[in-house]
Amino acid sequence: MKRTALIFACALAASPAFANDDLCTTNLQKIDDKMASETALGEAMKQQITDLHKQAKDAQQAGDVEGCAGYAGQAVTLLEKSSKGDGPAQ
C-alpha cells in the first residue's frame, strides 16, 4: 500500500514538468507556423517574437522547461494579439 502511494505521489509530482514540456514544444511549433504565414508583422514585433523564440529554445536546450514555456507563451500571445490587431503600433 505504501509503495502504491509513493508511486502515485511521484507521478503527480512529475506531471507539471511534463505538462510544461508539452506546452513548450506546442508553443514553439505555433510560433514557427504563425511566423511562416504571418505577413503583417512589423519589424519591431517580428524581432521581439524572434528574440522570445530564441530564449525559449535556449531554455529548452538547457532543460528549463518552465522558462521555455514562459518565453514561448509570451511570443504566442504577441502573435495572437497582432493577428487580432491588438498589438502595439509599429
Image: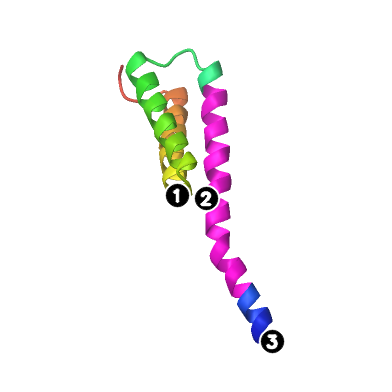
- Which amino acid, by three-letter code, is at mark 2? Asn
Q: Is residue 74 magenta?
A: no
Work out which residue is located at the far left of the displayed protein and give it.
89
Q: Is residue 48 left or right of residue 35?
A: left
Residue occupied by mark 3: 1
Question: Residue 10's quadrant in the figure?
Answer: bottom right
Asked if labels 1 and 2 touch by Cβ distance under 8 angstroms, the answer is yes
Disc 3 marks which amino acid?
Answer: Met
Q: Residue furthest front?
A: 62
Viewer-side residue, 82 vs 62? 62
- Residue under numbered circle 1: 66
Q: Residue at x 48, y 47 (%)?
A: 63
Q: Is residue 33 magenta?
A: yes
> Does residue 87 sit above or below 59 in this rendering?
above
Q: Quadrant of the N terminus?
A: bottom right
| Magenta span main SS | helix
> Considering only order in the chain, which callout, 2 or 3, is on the residue closer to the N terminus?
3
* Residue contact between numbered discs 3 and 2, judged by CB atoms under 8 Å: no
Q: On the image, numbered disc 2 is attached to which residue?
A: 20
Residue occupying the point 51% across, 29% down:
31
Q: Quadrant of residue 75?
A: top left
> In the image, what residue occupies the spot 61% across and 67% down?
11
**Where residue 74 sits: x, y (%)?**
41, 37
- At a point 52% along the width and 42% down the height, the residue shown is 24
